[in-house]
Amino acid sequence: MSSSTSTRPARPVALVSGSAAGLMRGVCVSLARRGHDIACNFKPDRTNADETLAAVRAEGAVAESFRADVADPAQAEQLVEQTASRFGRLDVLVCGAGPMLVRDLHATALEDFRAMIDGNLTSVYACSRSALPHMRAQKFGRIIAFGMTGSEITQGFRHLSAYAAAKAGVVAFIKSIALEEGPNGVTCNAICIGDIRDKSADRATAQTRKEYRNPTTRPGSWEDVGDAVAYLAGAEASFVNGAVLTVGGGWQGFFADYARWH
């Protein structure tokens, strides 16, 4: 599907899970703009990964897509190994996959709760654990995962008990492995994303829209998230480890909005 990497100088390789569409497609584009080749990932029932490949290749990067449901540790491990085999290296792991459930606890079945934990937290564990041998061997790596607004302080949200618990676990997990892997040249950081409704809007488009939901008075864009990931993936962030970066326009969730408007 793409040209061989054997005839060009080695470029850093980023694997972005859950990148067939949405914000993670934008993350792939932002990383490609900064010189990364991209392994994008889609679940077995998703068919629009070709659009991500086209967007990445338009930036001059090599891109391949790999089918895997990273909530299954065996598939997550296979995804990492396929990426390393295809590209010959793995420099950046972006754990972007993760379902969301908006439902009160009394209506949340055990299988729903497990789906949130496996999709959001177990997937990060499985991908990270599989990527570490490759990163340790080259004495360089970047692992980036995603929480939600308030994850860094374990803030609760109505209707989101399972999802919020999983995302708080992601942040604790990332902070912990940052302590373990820093001496091996691997940094591990988390990004907490605010309320971004239009996941296809770029920054220029977002800046033309005015909303009151955050102090910046505009919605976020895929470029805001993608550029934050690209920063953490780059050499400039080599001293940033175990950090939580919030990309939300200053929005602190329901209670901040309530205090402002009541």
Image (cartoon, rainbow, N blue to C red):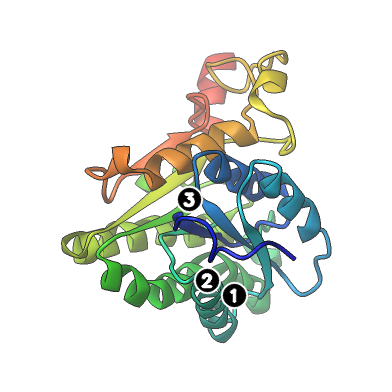
Circle 3 — which element? strand
Question: Where in the figure is residue 226, as x and y percent of width and height?
Answer: 55, 39
Q: Earlier in the sequence, mark 2 or mark 3?
A: 2
182 versus 210 height, above or below: below
User: Between tags 2 and 3, which lies in front?
Assistant: 2
The residue labelled by disc 3 is 147
Q: Quadrant of residue 194?
A: top right
Q: Residues within 10 Å of mark 2 (few under 14, many from 20)?
A: many
Residue 253: percent from left, percent from top? 53, 33
**Which quadrant would the C terminus be assigned to in this image?**
top right
Query: Which residue position is annotated with label 1?
Result: 71
Instruction: Tell me residue 83's x, y (percent).
Output: 54, 72
Q: Amino acid at mark 3?
A: Gly
Give the position of the N terminus as an image quadrant. bottom right
x 60%, y 67%: residue = 116
Three-letter code for the amino acid on which mark 2 is drawn: Ser
Is mark 2 in CB contact (under 8 Å) with mark 1?
Answer: yes
Q: Is residue 105 above or below residue 83?
A: above
Determine whether the residue tagged by mark 2 lies in a helix, strand or loop.
helix
Question: What is the distance, in whole Å, between disc 2 and disc 1 at their CAs?
Answer: 5 Å
Which residue is rendered at x = 40% and y = 49% of the image?
190
| Number of numbered discs | 3
| The residue positioned farthest toward the left in the image shown | 183
Q: Pick whichever of labels 2 and 1 is earlier in the sequence.
A: 1
Callout 3: 10 Å neighbours few (<14), some, many (20+)? Answer: many
Identified at 72% across, 15% down, the residue is 209
Residue at numbered disc 2: 123
Q: Nearer the viewer, residue 213 or 201?
A: 201
Vertical relation: 27 (above or below) 68: above
For badge 1, the amino acid type reads: Ala
Q: Earlier in the sequence, mark 3 or mark 1?
A: 1
